[in-house]
Image (cartoon, grey):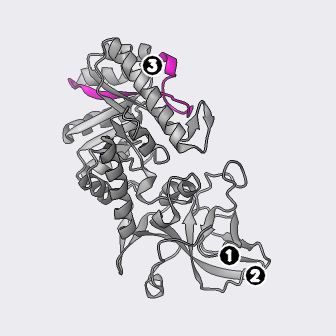
Amino acid sequence: MSAKLTPPVPEEIQAQLETPCIVIDLTQTRRNIIRLQEAANRAGCAVRPHIKTHKMGRFALMQIQAGAQGITCAKISEAEVMASAGVDDIFIAYPLVGAFRLRRAAALAPKVRRLILGVDSIEGAHALNQTAEDLGQTFEVRLEIDTGAKRTGVDYNEALHTAQAIEACRGLRLTGVYTFKSLVYQGKPTTDGAAAGREEGELLAEIAMRLRQAGIPITDISAGSTPTGIHVAETGLVTEIRPGTYIFNDYMLYKEGAADLEDIAAFLYVTVVSTPRKDYAVIDGGTKTFPMDIFLNTPPYFYLSYAMIDGRDDLVLTRLNEEHGMLTSLTGVTGLRIGQILRLIPIHICTALNLQNQVYLFDQGDLQTARIDARGMLA
């Protein structure tokens, strides 16, 4: 791993940190926001960032001020939090299933300028339509298409049939299609973000054409995660992309070729609390701090550790308990001392942030804390 990283906060400021914690470099964050927005602008494509990474109203507003047309959420509770922060154009890119979610969406809709809801089934559309008709409302919706991720999304070959059923619902207004495909090409995982992005644009454009030929006048074609987003935008076949992780970046995006190490803006800081033996040391972060949603030593990226230790390629974090993280030395000697503060690069920053109640914001010598507004918003 190259050592070309955003400089750590100065030692005198590190002394103010209550570890384990996340520190976000605001200068690099601003660069990341502007860089992607400008790239999308050049491609003539709108940006609707997913807030799953930062989960904070202040960052959503920063993205909008930089040119984003709105934001993307996964849950109605996240959308409510973002609306309370002043965001008025929100897409919930997740099937709204459950009467309580439908009621909350209906209550939120009049409070924002635009609320778009995701649908991926006829059953879900009918339930949403019933709520709309009962309340005398009309919901704007987009149909989710499975283009290879095999997560949510209607089967590619069933898209037209489902769209026609949605179009027949008087309480729904179908304005677009969307997908989450990520690094999948020809139905299989790939490390080629450009190829995956081109295919993503082509698949969505074909679906959009079928719907329009059938008389369904959709206008929005929404695609793209951070690894494929700009590649999709550059096809000219979609109207918007929904990247999320780009705002901070992480080691996963670096391995995927979607970011450089110097683009990473969020780091984990921990304290060494015990050095029982020379070959391992214990830090104050365990499963309550480090995400475990990656598999170690598996293809294609073969992550060696649950986080990368800045400046110490010889140390790995492969054993975690709730409050303990065991750093092991590949050379047999850690050289760490009790009380030492370490900076680690998160593999996946989105899930790392969701484990914290607050973060530190570092801005050109100034350090402040900020609450993670939509942390733990499950509904």
Q: Which mark is residue 212?
A: none
Looking at the magenta stretch, what is its main secondary structure? loop
The image quarter containing residue 308 is: bottom right
Which residue is depicted at the point 51% across and 71% down? Answer: 5
Please check the rendered image and state whether residue 138 is part of the magenta-colored stretch, yes or no. Answer: yes
Position of residue 1 measured from the top left corner of the image (x, y, whole percent): 62, 67
Range shown magenta: 136-158
Position of residue 142 measured from the top left corner of the image (x, y, whole percent): 35, 28
Which numbered disc flags the more N-terminal residue, 1 or 3?
3
Q: Are marks 2 and 1 in contact (CB under 8 Å)?
A: yes
**Badge 1 amino acid:** Val
Query: Which residue position is annotated with label 3?
Result: 159
- Position of 371 relative to 18 (above/below): above
- Position of 344 relative to 157 (above/below): below
Which numbered disc flags the more N-terminal residue, 2 or 3?
3
In the image, 122: left or right of 212? right
Image quarter hosting the C terminus: top left
Q: Nearer the viewer, residue 275 or 240?
A: 240
Which residue is depicted at the point 73% across and 72% down? Answer: 328
Q: Which mark is residue 276?
A: 2
In this view of the protein, can residue 51 be seen by the observer?
Answer: yes
**Badge 2 amino acid:** Pro
Measure how far apart labels 2 and 1 are at the Cα level: 8 Å
Q: Secondary structure at mark 2?
A: strand
Query: Which residue position is annotated with label 1?
Result: 282
